[in-house]
Image (cartoon, helix red, strand yellow):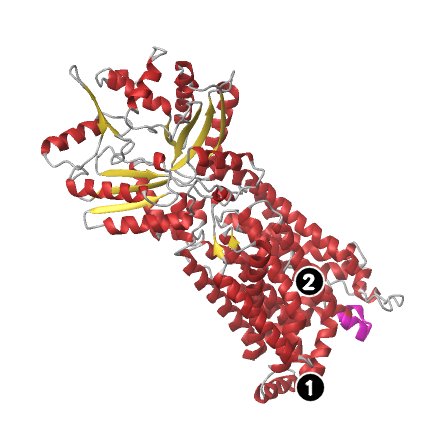
Amino acid sequence: MTFRYVLLAFCAALTGFFAYVLVTQSRLYDDPNDWLPANSAIGNLNNYMQEKFGGGNLVTIQVSVENGDIFNAETLNKVKRITREVGLIWGVIPYALQSIADIKTKYMRATEEFLDVTPLLEQVPRTPEEMERLKWGVYHNPLIYGALVSPDVKSTIIQADFRTGLGLSKRKDLPITDPVSIYRAISDIIDKEKDANHVIQAAGTPIIIGWVNSEGLLYIALAFLAFVGGVTAVLWRAFRSFRGAFIAVALGLVASLWAFGVKALLHGPVLESASALIAPFIVVAAAACHHTQFLKRFFDEEYPKAGDARRAIVNTFTPLLFPLMGSLVTDVVAFVVMAFVPFKNVSELGVTATYGLLSIVFNVFFLQIPMLAVLHGSPREMAAVRARHVDRRKTRIVRLLEELVEDLVTRTRRGKVMVACVFGAFLLSLACIPFLDPGQDNTYAIHNFLTRSWRNNEIFQMEQNIKKHFEGVYPLTIRIDSGAVDGLKEPEVERAIEAYENFMLRQPGVKGALGLPDYVKMINQFYEGGDPRHNRLPEDPQAVGLELEYYQEGFPGSFDAVASVDFKEHALRVYTGDTSHGTVRAVVEAARHYAESTFNRGELSAEVGGGAVAIAYGFNENIGRWLILATLASFVSSFVVLIPIFRSIVGPALLLLPLALGTVIWLGIVFLCGIEINSFTTAGMAMAAGVGVDAELYLLGRFREEYAASGDFQAALKEGFVKVREALSYSYVGLIAGCWTLIPIPLYVGYLGFGMGLILLVCFLCSFVVSPFLWSVLQPKFLLPTVGREAEPDLTPIAREGGRRS
């Protein structure tokens, strides 16, 4: 306190430095292709396929007309301009571009006099004859009609693929981009072409992720302001002083800023997942929880008694040091565990939150105390505090707490009913666990499950409209190795790939597929005069190679999107209409089963693992297991950390038991609310093991104080629970109110805020009910102060009063 102004100046300078680092250096690079662990087979294969063929970042742009069809000069000019401009976007894979206006899309017609293989839309038709030629080329090419042009010819699509990923960015010879840049570039292009008669829309994973990490950031900023406002309002009411609320919230805001600054300095300026943006919510919540205990005691107890700010700060800080440091350590441990989860959209949150919580540890000593010494209150505020202290009227919340705690401590019928309700809710929630399906469907995960905000979201509506005409917008890429140069030109290899493709087309959820055999069959049909009966693979072993060579004559690279230059490797693409857990699981597992049981033989082999569907499968396949492991590790780590603090095994177990019950109950409620158990769930589960234990430690610390003063176990238990629960009630109400102000936000922060508030509420109630009941029943020795423990109390009165109150 003597150096309070020096410390405040130091903290202000450090905050300014971290703010400068954050503004000038930090940037968000959130790419689902980088979410999987570094040793993931699917992730590595996806990167390989991206580098060689693309397929990881497919964007589908649909041009539709309100009146007429697409066969008019205005629409076709738009298609040509969009195709050209998309082809110029940095990071686009040129040979993966598909459009009726792309040079690789051919007009193919064979007559007795000539063979016409020319670009379909080299220029927009100027005469009726040229327009009829274009129509003929569309209707008679199965790779165009139904694939690039809708059956009602009112829509056509341009499909483009892009290379992304921090790993690929090391390649100097490949242009690499990111989802936000893709989204902005595509949006700029289509916005210029929209008019009254043309509806132009885009869909795909880069569009979803790009939108949420650009325009969606405004919602996150608004959500954070609402969260801070809600917490501040409740704490202001609790302290009856804006200064107290300001100190509690300011410490959380400063710690959040430091978290991003430290992360930028130690890990580089790139935030590899938007999940890191959730860290400030957690850090402010933790700061408010800790500082409310400190400030509530300072303003309501110590300062009115001492009348001197310095002495009151010392008297407040000394008894709270034990529970404060213990709870801060458990907070940090829970998020340290998250930092080691090998998924970027989980570990980024864990790392950032860890630095924020460590900043709170520092700020407790070097910022909170100096701020309180300077801002302990105006004379008017302190007069009001003293008046309340003299009046000593119990608030309604205190009277209610006293009644409930007495029921639980003396184990009356009402107390037993409350405990039975907690364990009943636990058993019911436990029955829901087998039905949980952890995973992440980004089509819906970025929106708010509670309000079903996707129904009014433009990005979601665009995807749904495109799927009405073309259905498949999410690719699964299967790498096929023929085992030899030019092996793909062998008829038996083509037939094996065709059989694989046909098998996948029969799977539920699959809406389309594209492979080299489709080109060969189309070329064969062309050679046979355009007769659809000849849309099949040729029998002549030489025919496949000749037809492929003829098709790309004058246009080298026509097959680069599906075949390597040496025709040894092949990318078979399968398209789904969604990335729901069931679709992703069924399609990928069917593809793997066919490869292992039927396709792989001799030198011919297939690997499944590229594209948005494979990435979703790789994530869903492991995230459930890692959520369980991370949660268990958080509880175990907190348990281990608490053992030396309590010098007991029973103590940590009893403190964590209510939180374990609360976590299961929370999962059951989340499941019944229809909220997806995805990576955002980790924030809530970590809060249960970390932030949730804070209440238990403060309860223990206050009980020991009261017992040391009175020597009466029962009275100390009641008094300790009531005094701490009053402060906890205010802090938890503030945190829950802040979290639940996010519910209307039409983004994932809406259901995230609901989940965070819900787990705080559930753990608070479980702790409130279970802890005093169990402590009074078991009367464990760890509850007693370590000093003077040899003077064991007479606990028999509690046993005698275990029945109904008189």
The x, y position of residue 10, in whole percent, is 61, 74
In the picture as drawn, the residue positioned furthest to the front comes out as 172
Q: Say the numbered circle drawn on residue 308.
A: 1
Left or right of residue 286, residue 45 in this image: left
Position of residue 85 relative to residue 585, above or below, is: below
Upstream in sequence: badge 1 or badge 2: 1
* Residue 357 in sight: yes
Type of the residue with mark 1: Asp
The x, y position of residue 766, in whole percent, is 64, 58
Left or right of residue 797, residue 770 in this image: left
Q: Quadrant of the C terminus?
A: bottom right
Position of residue 256 relative to residue 96, above or below, is: below
Give SS at disc 1.
Answer: loop
Q: Name the residue: 59% across, 89% down.
A: 379
Q: Within the image, what quadrant is residue 389 found in?
A: bottom right
Q: Within the image, what quadrant is residue 724 found in?
A: bottom right
Q: Name the residue: 53% across, 49% down.
A: 345
Q: Within the image, what quadrant is residue 613 found in?
A: top left
Q: Say the numbered circle drawn on residue 517.
A: none
Query: Quick one: 662 or 497, which is closer to the camera?
Result: 497
Q: Identify the magenta region.
A: 705-719
Q: Quadrant of the N terminus?
A: bottom right
* Residue 394 in sight: no
Position of residue 89 relative to residue 522, above or below, is: below
The x, y position of residue 8, in whole percent, is 61, 76
Mark pair 1, 2: CA separation? 28 Å
Give SS at disc 2.
Answer: helix
Secondary structure predominantly adopted by residues drawn in magenta? helix
In the picture as drawn, the residue positioned furthest to the right comes out as 790
Type of the residue with mark 2: Ser
Residue picked out by circle 2: 327
